[in-house]
Image (cartoon, rainbow, N blue to C red):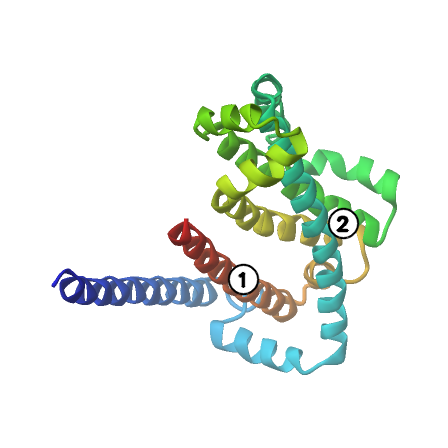
Amino acid sequence: MSATVAAPARVRRTTRRNFDQLLIVLVLLACWQGAYEYAGSVAVTSPAGTVAYAASMLGQMWFWGDVGATAIAFAYSLLIASVLGVALGLALGLWRFAADVTEPVLAALYTIPKVTLYPVILLLFGLGLSAKVAFGVIHGVIPITLFTLSAVKGLPPVLLRTARAMRLSPVQTILWVLTPAVLPEIFTGLRVGFSLTLLGVLIGEMFASQRGLGFLIINGINLHNVPLTTAVVLVIVLAAIGANVALLAADRHLRRQR
């Protein structure tokens, strides 16, 4: 009986959620069209014009070369930020005193505007892939660390006491106790780190590269090529939304499984 009652409720929730999402999209498109009508093509292209330009751009080999450059830098950045962030979060969470000391320091460091670090990054890594990867890592690693650290600190103390009673080593405690217990929270941190790492890579390409989607954006701005700039931004936004929807679905699945 309860399953019969719950099914229509789920359908109503899904329908309402889909309607809300459609309404948000329509409002954004209306605002975009309104901005075009107000400012004209010198500032922004219309939604229809942007979609048409983006469609033609997707058929050009030069565009996919820039997509590949961004994808490679982003893959390296996300891998480094994820491994380093999760490892730091788990290790610091295992030692509570170190976590209490380090957490406010990391939070304070993350509030520093990243633009102030760009000259240092450029001097250390120069122009090219390494600088883009560094930009991406410094944007993504601290949020992933903080999410993981916060998840470990929120665990019931009995888990760590049990691990000590079983005489597990720190590495065994991290692998067999902490990681499975906080896996959904770790995935949430990775989902947030995904977006911030992508942002860092794109900004890095604006300052420290001559290839990639970020370079196309800044090059379009410098040449006052409004259709190119708007179309590239649209492609990035749609790709990021699609990736985040998939990651959010996986996040919810992990939480239901737990």
Question: What SS does tag 1 mark?
Answer: helix
Q: Which mark is residue 133?
A: 2
Q: Is residue 33 left or right of residue 193?
A: left
Residue nearest the viewer, comparing 116 with 141: 141
| Horizontal arrangement in the rendering, residue 61 relative to residue 158 (left or right) | right
Badge 2 marks a residue whose secondary structure is: helix
Residue at 45 percent of width and 62 percent of height: 35
- 62 is higher (above) or lower (below) than 75: below
- In this orientation, does residue 240 appear? yes
Q: Looking at the image, which residue is at 49% across and 34% down?
A: 151
Q: Give how far across and how far down residue 158 sits, in percent.
A: 45, 26
Residue at (71, 81) in percent of width and height: 60
For marks 2 and 1, the one nearer the N-term is 2
Q: Which mark is on residue 14? A: none
Q: Can residue 113 be seen in this view?
A: no
Pick out the residue farthest to the front: 166
Badge 2 crowding class, 10 Å Cα cut-off, few under 14, some 14 to 19, many 20 or more, is: many
Give x and y (percent) for residue 69. Answer: 76, 64
User: In terms of image quadrants, where is residue 112?
Assistant: top right
Q: In this view, does 257 lie above or below 87?
A: below
Mark 1 highlights which residue? 243
Give coordinates of residue 30: x percent, y percent. Answer: 37, 66
Tell me: 156 left or right of 79.
Answer: left
| Image quarter hosting the N terminus | bottom left
The disc labelled 1 sits on which kind of residue? Answer: Ala
Residue 235 position within the rendered picture, expressed as x and y whole percent measured from the top left: 58, 68
